[in-house]
Amino acid sequence: METLFFELIQVATGQLDCLSRGPEADEWQQLYDLSKRQHIEGVCYHGVTKLFEFGLRAPQDISIDWMAETEDIREKNEQNEKQPLFLHYYDPELQPLRQSDDDPLFTVPEVTIQQMYQLYKAKKLDMRAMIDYFYTLQKTGGKYETLKGGGLFSRIGIRRFAAGMMWFLGNQMKLDTKQMPFKPLETEGRYLVSLLFDRQPVWFQFRHRMAWFQF
């Protein structure tokens, strides 16, 4: 399911044409549920519609619910005058489909690694934020990025986090390495995958939190 989910995101963001295989009926439901949990149902539904030309369609009941959720997001965005400034980095067709949030971290032109790290520490990191960061790096090449500040422990922690983010965005979302401001690290990237899917045992999470100086 993880593979299909990330492939669907890649289809939605234009990094992939089609899924590696057609999902079963119960897998479509899981994809829909995952997209809601990660606050990207509108973005993912855009990917779903792009699969129509390949003959891949979700069951009708799931498709109707998914489409309705997407239209709700679109309508709320049309009524919302406070859209994040970085939204212009998104592909035009996805701009009205990004689910709005009220996080004060995201009132700036670019999403930075410091902001992503703060979301991680606040246990608010999700795929919506990952896609925000993906588009910011894709359009800016990370030229605004820095790892300064926060003292020794914080700097070490955010460096490992930044390295994991690069692996995650490169491996799971196909971000070009030329657009990465930091060197990727697979171990930390896989931890971020496990964090999003809540599938690692407690000891594994504790070890990495200690490594990132969360306590």
Image (cartoon, rainbow, N blue to C red):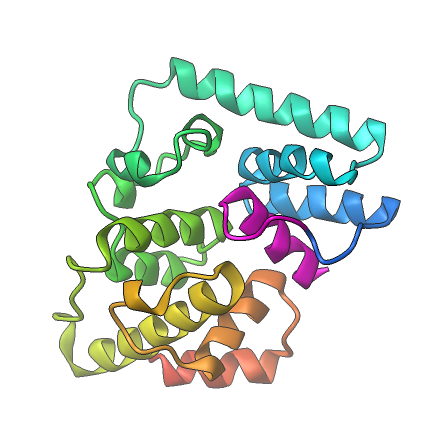
**In the depicted view, which residue is nearer to us: 9 or 101?**
9
Residue 99 can be seen, yes or no: yes
Left or right: residue 158 compared with residue 70: left
x, y percentage for residue 59?
Answer: 84, 34
x, y percentage for residue 39?
Answer: 54, 41
Helix, strand or loop: magenta stretch: helix
**Relative vertical location of residue 30 with respect to residue 51 in this rendering, above or below:** below
Quarter-of-image position of residue 142: bottom left
Q: Does residue 2 belong to the magenta stretch?
A: yes
Please name the residue shown 52% across and 24% down the image.
73
**In the depicted view, which residue is nearer to us: 167 or 52?**
52
Q: Which residues are the magenta region?
A: 1-18
x, y percentage for residue 93?
Answer: 45, 29
Please name the residue shown 75% across and 29% down the image.
63
x, y percentage for residue 173?
Answer: 49, 59
Q: Quadrant of the C terminus?
A: bottom left
Quarter-of-image position of residue 157: bottom left
**Relative vertical location of residue 89 with respect to residue 209 in this rendering, above or below:** above
Q: Does residue 24 belong to the magenta stretch?
A: no
Please name the residue shown 80% across and 50% down the image.
22
Left or right: residue 190 compared with residue 58: left
Please name the residue shown 29% across and 62% down the image.
179
Residue 214 can be seen, yes or no: no
Left or right: residue 123 compared with residue 84: right
**In the depicted view, which residue is nearer to us: 69 or 57?**
57
